[in-house]
């Protein structure tokens, strides 16, 4: 009718239908043969200058063209395709591991006898033990299998089954990382995952609200509560900052990210290469989506482990050994999450793929306006800080980048001693090196700012106080000297003694800073509690099964319990008794208690005076200095020190214990 061209119909023959039905069974042979690049030494008149690889590659192209052309006709055979492809992707080394490539064979037609037999004669294939041939064959067959996954997804799988089809291949593709395949396999694998997890047009997904054309980006958009920043509503609100064109690159769910977290929790040696994987994923999908998805899945991982731990500890069937094993496993899992968060921060600050993402979150807290965009930036910061809190130095670094200086200073003041370890110092050393780089150059100038209210998140005074807190945590080292020199160059300008007066102002309950600080402290308490329980589980005492949020595990308290002291006073009395037994008269030991308290009451004018013998002069005596010296001499702590010094000079201790002199005299 009209000018419409009539549609031609293709007539299927019995042969074409037979080939279509046999294709899922032929595919494993193609995958196996496509990696065989052996060139026969003798010429074959039937197939001159051809290899098994070239023949398999031509057959593969023809079959893929047929699938692209008649995709819907292959839907009944989809299950056979999935089995064949998973057989290649699931097994270590693929089909090549069980059927190694040949290194020598006789020509095809020369093996045929007049009666039609002989093709299956012994020695037709001779397997190769060469590593290079195996690796090359593995790469070619694996790439061919990954290509088939995409072809079937785009041309055969109906929209209603795309989600289930993708789930069939996510785990087997991700778990290839265990064998540490070549880089080209890793790149192709994540390209395939990005394609098969991308939702089809109109498909319902986890991020459908922001993919809808009716999504509200105006100032009147509803801002969700930040009570639980990891829920889907807050996640969609934060990712709403992406441009509409970039939102189309999001996955339908976070199954890929959950599989990566699960894989690395079981094979933690792979954490060394995790940063490369994250960088690659940031090139295929928006970095904002990658980081938020990892943050959510790490949080789900921790929650699941906490539920499992609670179930094991509360179960009456669990014996003491089972409790100890569970406590050790939980502490190990938290350490894994801490290392994972550290890798995320490394990629965030070092990878060129995250440059735009860094600029987006720069000063997102300290210089926040009332616009909807700044609200999204703030919520994005909150989601990431929720996970970065599992690594205290990562939380400090990220908070400095977002200008959340009040948050950083507040939780540094409440740091738990268990968090201060050798690894903590090494990570702080890396932080100081990062602060001195051009990436953080804006912080150097920020310390010179003088605001009307120094107690705000982005104030220069609070930044100066934060860096001083870090300096006080550092031991005497190169990093300490570098940071000290930086702060000394600013201290005189800021007049810190005046500018920082009153900065210990209490943070308002329910404020944004209060929410940030509580999250960091909550996570750090979880880590410290896990470490402490693991330490106690290694002792001979019965491990504690009770889990309570208000349980305070202090080192001094439990150390006294282990040693058998009733309380703190009992410990002090016991130590004094031991001193008397081993040192004799305890009165000879100078009592230092109260020395530091006396310092603040001492007159500064006389605090630097020392008792020395000087030659008489004709100058009149300094009445003020004499009064200052009298004040110093009258203090109890100073009297004790002077008496101890005089006894040492007069040899009183030697007279009281002459046996030591007799002993040494007899041995000279």
Image (cartoon, helix red, strand yellow):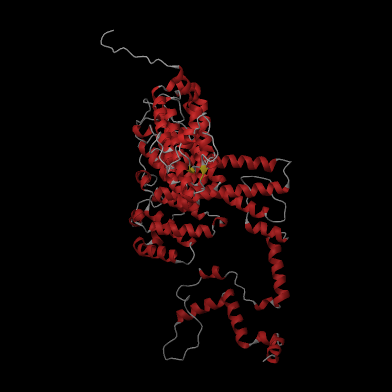
- 537 horizontally vs 384: left or right: right
Identity of the residue drawn at 39% across and 57% down = 435
Q: Nearer the viewer, residue 278 or 403?
A: 278
x and y percent of residue 492 in the render? 35, 64
- 648 horizontally vs 432: left or right: right
Q: Nearer the viewer, residue 153 or 588?
A: 153
x and y percent of residue 1 in the render? 29, 7
- 222 horizontally vs 595: left or right: left
x and y percent of residue 290 in the render? 43, 40
Displayed quadrant of residue 12? top left
- Determine whether 324 is above or below 190 in the image: below
> How many numbered discs sit on the rendered protein?
0
Q: Nearer the viewer, residue 79 or 173?
A: 79
Displayed quadrant of residue 303? top right
In the rendered image, the residue lying farthest to the top is 1
In the rendered image, the residue lying farthest to the left is 3
x and y percent of residue 285 in the render? 39, 38
Residue 354 appears in the figure: yes
Q: Nearer the viewer, residue 263 or 81?
A: 81
In the rendered image, the residue lying farthest to the front is 114
Residue 508 appears in the figure: no
Q: Quadrant of the C terminus?
A: bottom right
């Amino acid at each position: 009718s009209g000018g419409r061209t009539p549609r031609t119909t293709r007539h299927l023959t019995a042969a074409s239908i037979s080939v279509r039905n046999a294709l899922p069974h032929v595919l494993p042979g193609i995958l196996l043969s496509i990696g065989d690049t052996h060139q026969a030494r003798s010429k074959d008149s039937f197939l001159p200058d051809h290899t098994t690889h070239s023949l398999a590659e031509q057959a593969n192209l023809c079959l893929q063209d047929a699938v692209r052309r008649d995709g819907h006709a292959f839907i009944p055979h989809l299950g056979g395709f999935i089995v064949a492809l998973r057989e290649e992707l699931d097994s270590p080394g693929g089909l090549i591991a069980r059927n190694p490539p040949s290194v020598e064979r006789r020509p095809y037609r020369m093996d045929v006898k007049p009666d039609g037999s002989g093709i299956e004669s012994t020695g037709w294939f001779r397997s190769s033990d060469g590593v290079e041939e195996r690796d090359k064959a593995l790469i070619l067959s694996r790439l061919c299998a990954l290509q088939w996954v995409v072809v079937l997804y785009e041309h055969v799988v109906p929209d209603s089954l795309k989600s289930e089809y993708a789930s069939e291949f996510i785990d087997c593709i991700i778990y290839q990382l265990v064998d540490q395949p070549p880089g080209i396999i890793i790149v192709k694998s994540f390209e395939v995952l990005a394609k098969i997890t991308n939702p089809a047009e109109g498909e319902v997904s986890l991020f459908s609200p922001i993919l809808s054309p009716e999504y509200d980006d105006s100032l009147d958009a509803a801002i969700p509560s930040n009570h639980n920043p990891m829920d889907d509503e807050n996640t969609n609100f934060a990712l709403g900052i992406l441009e509409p064109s970039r939102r189309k690159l999001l996955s339908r769910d976070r199954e890929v990210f959950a599989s990566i977290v699960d894989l690395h929790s079981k094979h933690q040696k792979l954490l060394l290469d995790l940063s490369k994987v994250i960088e690659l994923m940031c090139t295929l999908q928006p970095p904002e989506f990658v980081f938020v998805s990892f943050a959510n899945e790490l949080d789900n991982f921790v929650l699941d482990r906490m539920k499992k731990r609670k179930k094991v500890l509360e179960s009456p069937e669990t014996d003491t050994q089972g409790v100890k094993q569970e406590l050790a496993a939980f502490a190990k899992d938290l350490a894994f999450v801490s290392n994972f968060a550290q890798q995320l921060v490394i990629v965030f600050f070092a990878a060129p793929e995250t440059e735009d993402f860094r600029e987006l979150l720069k000063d997102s807290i300290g210089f926040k306006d009332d616009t909807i965009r700044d609200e999204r930036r703030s919520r994005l910061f909150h989601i990431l800080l929720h996970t970065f809190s599992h690594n205290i130095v990562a939380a400090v670094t990220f908070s400095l980048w977002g200008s959340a200086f009040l948050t950083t200073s507040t939780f540094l003041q409440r740091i738990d001693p268990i968090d201060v370890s050798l690894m903590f110092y090494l990570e702080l050393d890396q932080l100081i090196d990062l602060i001195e780089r051009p990436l953080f150059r804006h912080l150097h100038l920020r310390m010179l700012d003088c605001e009307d209210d120094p107690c705000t998140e982005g104030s220069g005074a609070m930044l100066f106080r934060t860096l001083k807190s870090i300096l006080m945590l550092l031991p005497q080292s190169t990093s300490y000297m570098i940071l000290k020199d930086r702060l000394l160059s600013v201290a005189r300008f800021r007049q810190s003694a005046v500018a920082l007066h009153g900065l210990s102002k209490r943070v308002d309950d329910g404020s944004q800073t209060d929410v940030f600080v509580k999250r960091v402290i909550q996570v750090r308490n979880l880590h410290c509690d896990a470490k402490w329980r693991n330490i106690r589980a290694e002792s001979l005492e019965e491990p504690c099964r009770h889990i309570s949020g208000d349980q305070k595990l202090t080192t001094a308290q439990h150390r006294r319990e282990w040693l058998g002291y009733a309380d703190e006073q009992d410990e002090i009395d016991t130590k004094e008794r031991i001193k008397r037994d081993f040192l004799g008269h305890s009165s000879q030991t100078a009592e230092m208690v109260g020395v530091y308290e006396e310092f603040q009451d001492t007159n500064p004018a006389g605090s630097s005076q020392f008792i020395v013998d000087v030659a008489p002069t004709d100058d009149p005596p300094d009445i003020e200095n004499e009064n200052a010296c009298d004040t110093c001499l009258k203090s109890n702590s100073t009297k004790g020190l002077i008496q101890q010094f005089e006894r040492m000079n007069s040899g009183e201790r030697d007279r009281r214990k002459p046996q030591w002199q007799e002993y040494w005299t007899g041995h000279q």
